[in-house]
Every structure is written in C-alpha cells, then in structure tokens.
Image: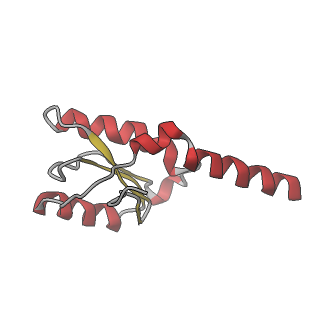
Amino acid sequence: MKHLAVLFLVLFTAGCTNPAYQRQIGKGPITLSDRAQASFEEYLDSNPSVFAITEDGSTSWGWYYCPENEGCRGNNFVYTGPAIRTCEKHSRGKPCKIYALGRDIVWKTEDK
C-alpha cells in the first residue's frame, strides 16, 4: 500500500511538470472582462474542474465541472484539452489557455 501511495505521488507530480501540460496554462498579465468574471463565478458555484479563457481575458466558454450526482473520477488534467478546444471554438480564433483547475487559479501572472 505504501508503494502505491508513492507511485501515485510520482505520477501526480510528473503530470504537473509535464511540458505539454505547462504549455496549456496561461501566463502573463490578464484582466477578465465583466462577462468572463461572471462566467468564472458561475464556474466556482459548480463542482469546478477546469476553466479556460482567451489570453486577453475576454471569452471563457471553455469550462468543465463535475455534476454532483455523477461521482466523477479522475483528475482535472483530463479536461484541459477539451476545455481549451471549447473555448477556442467560441472565441472567434483567439487562443485559449487554462486559468483555473478546480478552485485554484493556475494562470501565471509572472515568469518564473
């Protein structure tokens, strides 16, 4: 059982440091439009999973949540690609990035 916990921790950490995953996270200064802020608040009121937004903060159609009665399994990383694609489908060609995973804002406002 101890080995299983260590394996889980290693895989979880590897997913967070994966370069492909890191490219999906937004970075740089961002200001959410009033509409995007309202959408983010609605997202937070759900059982949040992934919130994607255009790099200029104007459009946020790409968010996923887990309906409480469905007992979703897995992690939020599974939904990053679909969230970005949904956002970009509605953004009139503007690129989208991940703004939040669950309730945590992961957008990097500074280069580190």
Q: How many numbered marks are there?
A: 0
* Side (left or right) of 83 relative to 14: left
Say which quadrant the C terminus sits in. Answer: bottom left
Seen at 44% across and 60% down, the residue is: 102
Vertical position of residue 1 compared to residue 23: above or below: below
* Side (left or right) of 35 relative to 72: left
Say which quadrant the N terminus sits in. Answer: bottom right
Q: Can the viewer see residue 1 in this picture? A: no
Where is residue 24 shown, x and y percent of the image?
Answer: 40, 42
Picture colour scheme: secondary structure
* Side (left or right) of 100 relative to 55: right
Relative to the observer, which residue lies in front, 112 or 46?
112
Where is residue 91 shown, x and y percent of the image?
Answer: 17, 38
Relative to the observer, which residue lies in front, 87 or 22?
22
Seen at 44% across and 54% down, the residue is: 66
Seen at 17% across and 49% down, the residue is: 56
Where is residue 107 shown, x and y percent of the image?
Answer: 36, 57
Q: Toward which corner of the image does residue 45 lie, by quadrant?
A: bottom left
Q: Can the viewer see residue 14 in this picture? A: yes
Q: Toward which corner of the image does residue 15 lie, by quadrant?
A: top right
Where is residue 110 shown, x and y percent of the image?
Answer: 34, 60
Vertical position of residue 80 compared to residue 111: above or below: above
Name, please, the residue furthest toward the front.
112
